[in-house]
Each structure stands twice: as C-alpha cells, then as structure tokens.
Image: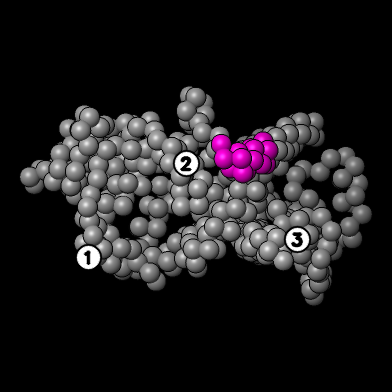
Amino acid sequence: MDLLWAVLSYVVPFVLVITIIVFVHELGHYLVARWNDVAIETFSVGFGPELLSLTDRHGTRWRLAAIPLGGFVRMAGGTNAPTEGEAEALAKYPPDMQPRLFTNKSVWQRFAIVAAGPFASVLLAFVLLYGLLLGYGRDVAPPVLQEIVVGSPAEAAGLRTGDRIISIDGFAIRGFDDVQRLTATAPERQVAIRFERDGVDQTTSVVPLAETVADRFGRPHRIGRIGVRNSYSATDYVHYRPNPLEAVGMTLEDMRFVIDRTAAFLGDFFVGRGDLQQLGGPVKVAEVSHQMAGLGFVAMVNLVALLSFNIGIMNLLPIPVLDGGHLFFYLIEALRGRPLGERAQEIGMRFGLAVVLALMAFTTVNDLFQQARTLVGL
C-alpha cells in the first residue's frame, strides 16, 4: 500500500500538470483552426491507446490517451505541403470539403493556426502568474545590503553595506529576494548591478561564484553567490500587492527573466559551463510535480505556469516537427511564393525528428542517472 501511494503521489500531480498544459496548447491550435473553418478530425490529449473519447457535432473526435507526454490536433489536409501520395489522398475529399482542408488555406492562415499553440501556452503562463500576483501579492524586504563577505565578488565589485540595489541586468529590484534570485541564476556569468549610495545612482558589474547547494528536497543545484547577506526578520517584510496595471508589467518582466536565464543556461553548454544535473525530462517533471504538490496550491500553479511558458517558447524553435519548424516552412513559402519541395520537407522532418528524439532520450537517461546517484548517495 505504501508503494502504491508513493507511485500515485508522483503520477497524479504529473498527469494533472501535463494534461492542463497540453490541453491549453492544443486548444490554441483548435480554436484558430475553427475560426478559419478548417475541418478538425481529432483532438487528442496524450498518445497511444485511447482511454476515453467522444465525437462532437462537428465531427471532431476528442480523445484522452494513455501516454500523457503530449497531444495533437489532427486537421483534414495535414500541416505541410502535400507530397505526391498525399495529394492523391486529398483529392478524394468531396468538393464541399476542399475549402476546409488545412493545406488549401492561405499560408498566413496556416501560420496563424500553428502559431496559436505556442501563443496559448504563453498566454496560460501569463494569466496564471498575473492571477497569483493580483491574488496573493509578494512579501518583500528592503533591497539594502546589510553585510558584505570579505573577499567576495561583491566586495571586489565595490559594493558596500547600506547600498540599495535598484536593478540587476536591467531587471527592477523590488526586494532583497530579487537580488538573491537574479544572482543565484547567473553562476560564473557577469551581471550588471545598478545601486544607490548616499542618494547617488552608481553601476558596477560582478561575476557570481558557482556553488552547488541542496534544495529542501535534497536535490543539488548549481547557483551563483556574490557574497551579500541580510539579517531581516519576519517583521521587516512588507506585503506588497500591485494594482492591475502594475501587475501586467511585473508579470511580463518575470516572463522576460525566464527567457533571459533560459537562454543563458543553454548558452553555458557551448562554453563548457553547463550543468547536466539541471537538465530534465519527464522523470524530473514528475519529481518536481510531486514536490510542488506537497508545497500547496500556489507552488503547483507556479509550476504549471513555468512549464507552459517554457513549452510555448521552446516550440517556437525553428526545428521541423515542432511548431516553430512548420512556421519556418511557411515563412519560406511566403517569401518564395510556393512551398518547399517534397525532398526538402522530408529531409527537414527527419532531421527535426532525430533532434527531438535524441533530446528526449538524453534528458530521460540523464534523469534516471541522477535518480540513481541520489539513491546511492553520490
């Protein structure tokens, strides 16, 4: 019974998180396709064997499948320029269906339909983060440096006790937690710091030292330290709740922060600073979902928002098979006035599939390796 409960405590939060994210992403494709009068054959959450399904009055089959690692919206007419064999199959659709085939829509209609999935993922992240900010606000302590560690990067950069941090890398600082967050996510990367001293704005730069620490769940993380501390007590924190307009700017800044730090994280691998322990696939998502479920509703909503945003952005990469790959093909078609040839599409799709499968295999194996290391105490 204990084993069953342990398994369910991982599986249920993981399935819930992934299902919400996949459903919203695919709903974006579905709605814009419907608005453009495209015939939709299937809306699937998950892959593999079908668990539940129903067919609506428009002829769309809505299905829930057994493998919750993605989903798809299958539209009549496919998503790319038809090959010779596919063109023959499309010709078999009755005349009244021809205008409703995806491939018979204009290139910009097809572009909008494909782009709607990533847009829906990003919009979901915005709505959730914005709602949490309005509903719960934030507890902030003054971003004033109370202690500088001797010999630290902060001391070398000329920072002193009493300095009030205004921004880091262009991101506004509203509390001391922001200082820690922005420096911790930049190990061994130079960050620009704007601060106020004696009423005068000044700037400096600092390179946080890399340090490996364990989170509350015992998992190691590589973070940056600049050597600043504070001794704020609970009474020093102020609950801050922005107005609706200010919350829009704060939410967009949080999303920009994720893009900035994700790009920097990926860039680290090209210069030899990448930390494989920070990469994750389905196993890690399941573990994090389990952990966030234990921390409560707000933590789970934050996780859904972060994953949805990352999926939306990553799907825009110009890799065939991903939405971004299709969008890249459509842009080429718009510029050339005709689709890419069958051979070029085939090569692109094979390359994209190889990249995606390789990345999935690598992250899954990496997840399992890290789990094994944790079990044996390494």
> Residue at label 3?
44
Q: Mark 1 Cα within 10 Å, few/some/many (few <14, many 20+)?
A: few
Q: Position of residue 144 (x, y in %)?
A: 19, 49
State the colouring used for the structure image: one colour
Which stretch is magenta?
Answer: 362-378
> Relative to 376, is 28 above or below?
below
Residue at x 87% of width, y 45% of height: 86
Q: Is residue 97 left or right of residue 243?
A: right
Q: Position of residue 10 (x, y in %)?
A: 64, 59
Which residue lies most toward the top here?
271
Name the kind of residue labelled 3 in the image: Ser
Dividing the picture into quarters, in which one does residue 59 lie?
A: bottom right
For the C terminus, the image quarter is top right
> Relative to 356, is 51 above or below?
below
Q: Position of residue 354 (x, y in %)?
A: 73, 34
> Residue at label 1?
235
Q: Mark 2 Cα within 10 Å, few/some/many (few <14, many 20+)?
A: some
Name the kind of residue labelled 2 in the image: His
**Closer to the camera in the image, 219 or 107:** 219
Q: The residue tagged with tag 1: helix, strand or loop?
A: helix
Which is nearer the N-term, disc 2 or disc 3?
Answer: 3
Say if residue 109 shows up in the picture.
no
